[in-house]
Image (cartoon, rainbow, N blue to C red):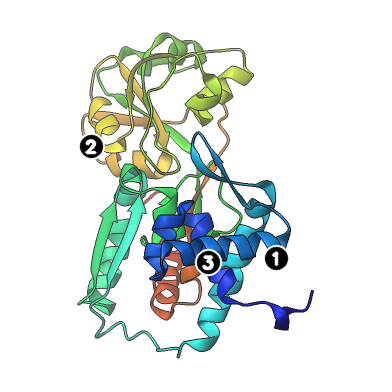
Amino acid sequence: MNIDRIDLNLLVYLDVLLRERNVTKSASQLGLSQPAMSNGLRRLRDLFEDPLLVRTSDGMTPTERALELQPVVREALAQLEKAIQPQVPFDAATSDRVFRVMASDYAESTLLPQVLSRLRVEAPNTTLDIMTPSDVSFLDVEQGKVDMVINRFDSMPQSFHQKSIWSDTFSCVISRDNPILDNFDLDAYLGAHHVWVSKTGWGVGVGINPQDVQRLGWVDEALNRLGKKRNITVFTRHYTAAMILAEGRDLVVTLPSRAANLLKNSPSVVIRKPPFDIDPFDLKMAWSPLLQHNSGHQWLRQLISEVAATMPSDS
């Protein structure tokens, strides 16, 4: 098949169809009539010799071939868009751009204050719109409606660009009045009441099953490898709430060390190393391939990387 015999508009149709998975919505987004969009889908099916989208009880579902094509087509269109649009340099000093960043409150409390300080100096007219993981869907990120997602991710779509910001360990935050401080070993840790805190990825969260160790995360997986289990009495998705709960006399909070160290000067709590080994994790930023070559986005990514590199692990 020669590419000069292909109507490249069909790739635009395919990109939108696979994103919306709805002929009517795709037609509306492209400013086409529904019959024209249906005709485009028919031509795509002929071109790739595959149905691409199949109607099921869940709506239009992409075939395996369509899922293989989606990141390839998206990247090809992104490169084409870069080639045909004039590259306008980003002027941080005068820009009034709104940067929308989805961040867990771990990232929001440890990294973003320093990022905001740099923005106020170097790009004083910009606005930082910080969104929570529950505010953002996969499609929002894929379509470039959100500039950046910063969080811990168990998995990442292959089409997304990503970069590690830093690696972090874990620490225990304990009330100064908690008697387990006198002999803080594994037995004391297991005998305490614990606060679980985590929110990875993006999208609306679901309830936690305390028996599902695989979904509980790093701390409980580390204990499971030892054949142990902690007594979790509070589940929260907010690190700030967990740090407040740590002041409770009978509670232990195990959380990322950079978050724990925000309390290092608190008179009411003590920070201790966990009495067992927990694998470190990476905080990452990820973004849509549609934004990869945007000059303002490139500037923001560089600024975040520079800020993270200057922050000591015990800050």
Q: What is the spatial separation of the Cα atoms under label 1 and label 2, in whole angstroms?
A: 65 Å
Decide if residue 129 is in sight here: yes
At x 44%, y 17%, the residue is 209
Location of the N terminus by quadrant is bottom right
Looking at the picture, which amino acid does disc 1 mark?
A: Leu
The picture places residue 265, in percent across and down from the top left corner, at 25, 41
Q: From the viewer's perspective, is the residue at label 1 or at label 3 nearer?
A: 1
Tell me residue 60's x, y (percent).
Answer: 52, 45
Residue drawn where x is 31% and y is 18% of the image: 251
In terms of sequence position, does the residue under pointer 1 or pointer 2 come before the other?
1
Residue type highlighted by circle 2: Ser
Asked if the residue under mark 2 is in contact with the one under mark 1, i.e. CB atoms within 8 Å, the reply is no
Residue beneath label 3, please? 13
Q: What residue is at 38 percent from the left and 65 percent from the top?
A: 29
Q: Give x and y (percent) for residue 38.
A: 52, 60
Task: Return the residue nearer the eye: 190 or 6.
Answer: 6
Q: Nearer the viewer, mark 3 or mark 2?
A: 3
Asked if residue 147 shows in the view, the reply is: no
Question: Closer to us: mark 1 or mark 2?
Answer: 1
- Label of residue 266 in the image: 2
Identify which residue is drawn at 45% across, 54% down. Answer: 20
Query: Compared to 82, does 102 lie above or below?
Result: above
Q: CA distance from mark 3 to mark 2?
A: 57 Å
Q: Which comes before the other along the chain, label 1 or label 3?
A: 3
Provide the residue designation for mark 1: 47
